[in-house]
Amino acid sequence: QVQLAESGGGLVQAGGSLRLSCAASGRTVNRYAMGWFRQAPGKEREFVAAINWNGGAAYYADSVKGRFTISRDNAKNAVYLQMNSLKPEDTAVYYCAGTFGTVVPMSTRGYAYWGPGTQVTVSS
């Protein structure tokens, strides 16, 4: 089993930056695709970004492209989400997710493991 734990959330003003971290434990995730999703109150969980097992390919939702960057450090068993130029509409609980294999899912159904989430609030 893989356990995922997010950190780095908080309150930031519009235009600011945050860096989310996702620490994996239980198993090495260097053969796992990893993703970030978010869920705002009253809305469904949505895809934000994903990265393949070796960091060679990354995918982004149109709403965050050019502002967010996903990365991973397999030596540390960790994944990161650098969020710049934050907007109030980025406010949500952000979840880290992982799944074994070379395919990089961009839907919640594609991921087997989930963290509990971290709150990001962007004030206007």
Image (cartoon, rainbow, N blue to C red):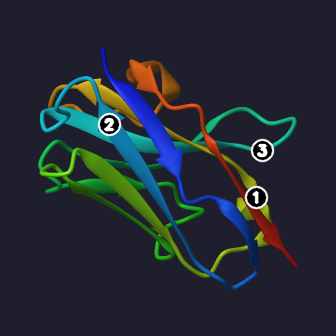
With respect to residue 7, does 4 lie above or below?
above
84 vs 116, nearest the viewer: 116
Residue type, mark 3 in image = Ala
Q: Nearer the viewer, mark 2 or mark 1?
A: 2
Instruction: Say which element carries label 3.
Output: loop
38 vs 59, nearest the viewer: 38
Relative image position of residue 109 (x, y in whole percent) = 47, 19
Instruction: Answer with mark 2 or mark 3, whichever residue precedes in sequence.
Output: 2
Left or right: where 62 falls relative to 30: right
Instruction: Answer with mark 2 or mark 1, whichever residue precedes in sequence.
Output: 2
With respect to residue 62, does 113 lie above or below?
above
Q: Which residue is mark 1?
A: 91
The residue located at (66%, 34%) in the rendering is 45
Dot 2 surroundings within 10 Å: few (below 14), some, or many (20 or more)?
Answer: many
Residue type, mark 2 in image = Ala
Q: As drawn, which residue projects farthest toward the top?
A: 1
Q: Quick check: can you spot residue 104?
A: no
**Disc number placed over residue 24 in the picture, else none:** 2
Q: Which residue is mark 3?
A: 40
State which quarter of the image contains the N terminus: top left
